[in-house]
Image (cartoon, rainbow, N blue to C red):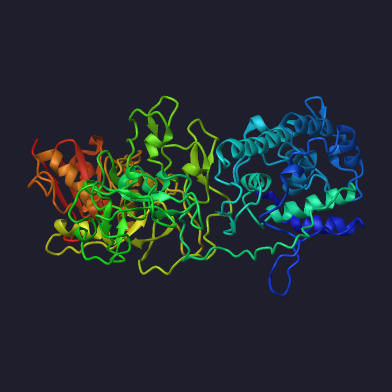
Amino acid sequence: MNRSSLHLLGLFAISLAACGAPAPLGEQVAADGEFLAFDPENVLSDGDLTDSGALDADRIQAFLEKTHCGNRSSLADYTSNGKTAAQAMAEAASQYQINPIEFLTRIQMEQGLICNPADQASLDRAFGCGCPDGQPCSPQFLGFDKQVACAAKSLRSYLDDIASDGETIAGWAPHKAKLSLDKYSVTPENAATAALYTYTPWVYNGGNNLHFQVWNAIVAYLGKTPLVHTDSKPKQSLRPRTCSEGDTACHSDVDCHHGNPGAGVVCANSGPARGSCIEACHSDADCPAGSTCDTSASPHWKCSAPYPGFGTACASDSDCNKGAQGAARVCSSQSGKCILGCHEDTDCAKGAVCDRSLPTWTCVSRKAIGEPCGTDDDCNGGVDGTQRVCGNEKVCIDACHTDRDCEKTWYCSHETEKWSCKPRLGDESDNGCRAPESCPVLEFPSGVKIQTRKDAALTKVYGNHLGSSDTAPECFIDIDDLYNPDTGQKYDYSHVKLSDNFTLRELVDTEVSQGWSRRVLVSPAMVEALQSFRDAVGVPVSINSGYRSPLHQEAVCKAMCGNPLGCPGTCSNNSRHMYGDGLDLPDQFYSKKYAQMACDAGFRFAYAELCDHLHVDMNPRNSSCVISFDQC
């Protein structure tokens, strides 16, 4: 939930010491680095979390009147909607079968309400439930009685999801490794621990280590058994994931083949690789055409091999797919090895397209925004982090239903009618886990700095679109990884401003929303000229079309004249749209007056094009601004 608890570990320890109570059981680290008390993979037992009768309303009230800190809690005299705090906790415990000690633990973690004075704002947000990190709380969850009911219902739903689906809505599950938000790989030993990480997906930073300490302090005061782990099982020495360690976790086969089931890649359901994508099969349908699933292979069933295996050295795509279409096997331009992926739609099975939004272009079977749908998989192809779901009207929309629909470290915000992905407070940086980049950092008029990155496959597509003095761009803006290398801050694609009046999204929206690419180009000099033009005209300026990748430009030209490589006089083969410094403005600016104003603002070319819009760009071939008009 929210991370106001980050400072409470220190406050909590101070409060205990000040009131003479025993210090809480904390993290004890031996010389070899092993944890002697806190076990991050067994934070709480299932029986402890669901012991709803551990305290009744009278005993909760008695505890609030004299807490383990030796004080009278503000909650002892607090009522909301006619219920005392003790009654609200007892009723929630009974209704949702959750231990009321969990509520006492969590309100101390979240707001310090047991040991510290409380104001109305902290009482209204006692559990941080309905309060996404860094965002206002939803009004329907404000009030202590609503907060305790929300928290209890959430924990119960996580446990129920594990019982029915094997995992929580956030993908936490017993005996399955998952990365916490402070980048530790945790394998919960039981459902209770998985539920706690779903509620607060941190090991440290006010997370489950703090839960362990607070719980122990409270139960010791109540005369119950503390959660000291005395068994002989060695406690793992957790370490953050390093930059070289990739994410291969999966929940189902579709997480690995993304709607291309004949690729010979599945999610391992047994053995040491369980929960990871592997080159294997569960049935003949998992194998490429002409191949069968060898059920005698060990440790995992393997497809008979009509194609070279992944990782085989290659020089061209045909080395990996033997010239066959639909194999979803190409030669990586970066590693020179065969990989599961695509360069063109024809590399994918029938009904799938090559999704260029993913770091490695991948075949995905999914519908476009606005198309009819029945499930979220119809719209996102089973790929996490796409922010594409099936809406209430049963059409695909740009939105989210759960955190899994958002990129890593982002969450699905429910604050607006159409839920959308937002970054978590404190997760805008990458904790230094960044490989050095050889590409430049772009600084825009707003002061935003964005690191660019290489994309050899996209650079290669420029080959057919270069003029005599052109050089194919090598470095691009990755809209799924917008970060400032100086500060580590990560930007939100939908809202990051490049100037006073223009966001990145509106300058590249036709490229991204139509699914061409999520690697784009935007020239800071062009943004500066556009803002100057906006200041001069004094009215809002919308963008008809901004950046276009070469394949996008080819589609535009093909629609106009049937020739994807350009139409003399109507569609340029080497349009400045492809270099991120060309824009089309709507027909309201179709006049010589606005063309001249564009030149005065800093553009190098102003073209009243096709009698219905004004094209402007920063064409480096022009030593001064050139104005041109089509004859209508």
> In the image as oriented, which residue stretches furthest toward the bottom?
31
Residue 436's image quarter? bottom left
Which of the two residues, 358 or 245, is positioned nearer the viewer here?
A: 245
Q: Eyeballing the image, is 144 above or below 621?
A: above
Quadrant (top left, top right, bottom left, bottom right) of the C terminus:
top left
> In the image as oriented, which residue stretches furthest toward the front?
296
Q: Eyeballing the image, is 540 above or below 461?
A: above
Quadrant (top left, top right, bottom left, bottom right) of the N terminus:
top right
Residue 449's image quarter? bottom left
Q: Which residue is depicted at the point 29% across and 42% down? A: 510
Q: Which residue is depicted at the point 78% across and 36% down? A: 52
Is residue 83 found left or right of 603 in the rendered image?
right
Q: Which residue is depicted at the point 13% across and 49% down? A: 572
Which of the two residues, 539 or 46, is positioned nearer the viewer here?
A: 46
Is residue 167 found left or right of 220 in the rendered image?
left
Instruction: Tell me if residue 79 can be seen.
Output: yes
Q: Position of residue 556 (x, y in %)?
A: 18, 42
Q: Position of residue 547 (x, y in %)?
A: 27, 49
Q: Position of residue 578 (x, y in %)?
A: 23, 53
Which of the two residues, 314 or 267, is positioned nearer the viewer here?
A: 267
Q: Which residue is depicted at the point 85% across and 37% down? A: 55
Instruction: Tell me if residue 512 can be seen.
Output: no
Is residue 627 found left or right of 82 in the rendered image?
left
Q: Eyeballing the image, is 139 above or below 596?
A: above
Is residue 46 found left or right of 498 in the rendered image?
right
Q: How many dots with numbers?
A: 0
Q: Position of residue 344 (x, y in %)?
A: 23, 50
